[in-house]
Amino acid sequence: MPRWVVFCIDFFLSLLAISFTVTVMLTSPYLPYLTLSMWEKIGIILGLQIISFGTFRTYIGIIRHSTFVDIYRVALSAIFVLICGLVINYTHYWVTEEKIFLVIELLLYTIFSALLLISFRVIVKESYHFFLNAISGKFKKEVFVYGVDDRTIGLTNSILADTDSKFKPVAFLSNSKNGKNYKVIGLPFLSSSGNLDEDLKKYKGIFKIDGILIVGDQASTKDKNYVVESAFNNGLEVFNIALPQQWTSAETRVNISPIEIEDLLERNEIEVDNQLISKDLKGKTILITGGAGSIGSELARLIAGFEPKKLIILDNAESMLHDIDLYLKKNFPALNYQVYLADITNADRMDGIFTKFKFDIVYHAAAYKHVPMIERHPREGIRTNTIGTRIIAELAYKHNCDRFVMISTDKAVNPSNVMGASKRAAEMFVQALQKKPDVKTKFITTRFGNVLGSNGSVIPLFKKQIESGGPVTVTHEKIIRYFMTIREACQLVLQAGTMGKGGEIFIFDMGKPVRILDMAERMIKLCGLQPYKDIEIEITGLREGEKLYEELLIDGETALSTYHPKILVSRMVDYDCQTMIRALDKIEQMINNGDDNIAIIQKLKILVPEFVSQNSIFKSLDLTKTNGKTSTPRV
């Protein structure tokens, strides 16, 4: 309504309050003063009321969205009229010794006007919400809110006030066993019996319920899994809502979404020594190769917060490099950084960049990582992962960089594919380079498994398949993988970088491996669907170069603990640098000469003897068994 309409309604309600006051006074034993006529007294009161409306701007709010502030204004307006009426009354008395109003008249009018003005706003607001909820309520999902504290109560109130929300909280589901029966903001408080599965079965008979809402980090990962399993057993969905302090700057309203599989992977929170990392990185000139990829871009975001002297982000992926450029420009305007569109296999270009910036630290994350793709295009995988690493490592040595930190993978352990073998060869070269007598650079390798949410990882793939109606494809019913979040992995890379003395391979504790089929089934359930019924799961068979499980240690490696509980360190047998150089020279020559893939992979298998191909055309090149022993074919 326009403001003038609200003003007119308020004025009419003031007239109504005056009529109530006159009616009450006529039936009371009190006789009014006859100093002024009734109409003159009404004129004074209405004049004061109009002034109070203008002073406290009671008409500016949207009535259906009235809040305590609007009620407060109305109350102040009523009190203003009372005080002004009393001032006029007693001023007149002091001058003429005659009063205009009975005090009871002014009090009654104040009470009636305040009640009418406030009631009007409350009735409009509640009627609006009642009819809107009546219309849209049948389309809302009714949910239990898990846990009760000030934050969950506040967010629940916000959800109830949001008429556009697709969710309607109907009760608080407590995880305590106090047994008390009471209400919070009008919603019942349901205490726990200690068995959530049974509680939900009981409460489903009382409430029409669609799911359970978990607020922010109110529940531990273990509790979330417990809630999810109990909800699934009762045919309920599970949703998640972030706390306001976790909202991004773009979020202006309560955002509820299905709980993500990442939230259910049981992983202890990783703590790193930020003070030590800051001391290590602050004021340094740093290069990140592969800086636009999943790991590289997260490293850039983390390092930007430690105030480096100069940060160079290098990648050959134009679009993603543009994205990280925009992110840093917006979020770190004071950061001294540059992005470089370049390829690590271009030795002359890389040498120019190293000469220009004199890097203190190099984080080498550039690599091709998709196993089936590299199995079909092995020369490109080897050119980037092995030869490219050699170029960057040799430049770090040549320009006396303080530290070179290489990002490796668990697929380099007893590799079953070209991608893993190319990364293993890179590890071997980096360790061999450390043994050169005049080396000043500390060459450090970090090795970890799959990263949640990274480009091409299984979880985004499953999400797309579920959104499109399936089927969800799993390569083998027994395949398992280690998982770690991108942020966790990058934090440990930075921490491991502070530990290295040179030549080590740091191995990250990835927790328990996860069966991919179990993950697929759970993701389907998290979307409110039934696996094999609503969404099919198709077993497609192992892909080229894929194995059932990944390892973190090569035969012969020993892992020792470090001062960080999530980081182990491994030292391998020494590799002769000249032997490695000759082998890589030969492989690079074969790639550049266009030699057959079979010949190139055969040479790589000699360099990496533990490389045994699986589900691959290169399997014919593998070790042949003679009298129970294995021997490597030589070329």
Image (spheres, rainbow, N blue to C red):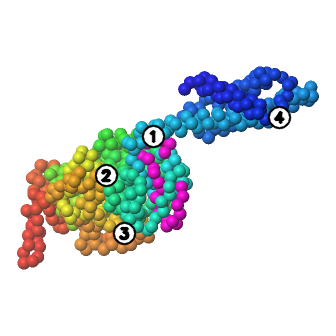
SS for dot 4: loop
Closer to the camera in the image, 15 or 2 = 15
Q: Earlier in the sequence, mark 1 or mark 3?
A: 1
Around disc 1, counting alpha carbons within 10 Å, would you say few (fewer than 14), some (14 to 19), or many (20 or more)? some
For label 3, the residue is 568
Cα distance in 3D space between marks 3 and 2 = 40 Å
Q: Quadrant of residue 562?
A: bottom left
| Three-letter code for the amino acid on which mark 2 is drawn | Gly
| Three-letter code for the amino acid on which mark 1 is drawn | Asn
Around disc 3, counting alpha carbons within 10 Å, would you say few (fewer than 14), some (14 to 19), or many (20 or more)? many
Q: Is residue 99 above or below residue 360?
A: above
Q: Residue at x 17, y 64 (%)?
A: 611
In the image, which is nearer the foreground, mark 3 or mark 2? 2
Q: Quadrant of the C terminus?
A: bottom left
SS for dot 2: loop
| Three-letter code for the amino acid on which mark 3 is drawn | Leu
Q: Quadrant of the N terminus?
A: top right
| Three-letter code for the amino acid on which mark 4 is drawn | Tyr
Cα distance in 3D space between marks 1 and 3 = 57 Å
Q: Earlier in the sequence, mark 4 or mark 1?
A: 4
Around disc 2, counting alpha carbons within 10 Å, would you say few (fewer than 14), some (14 to 19), or many (20 or more)? some
For label 1, the residue is 133
SS for dot 3: strand
Q: Is residue 189 above or below residue 117?
A: below
Circles 1 and 3, Cβ within 8 Å, touching? The answer is no
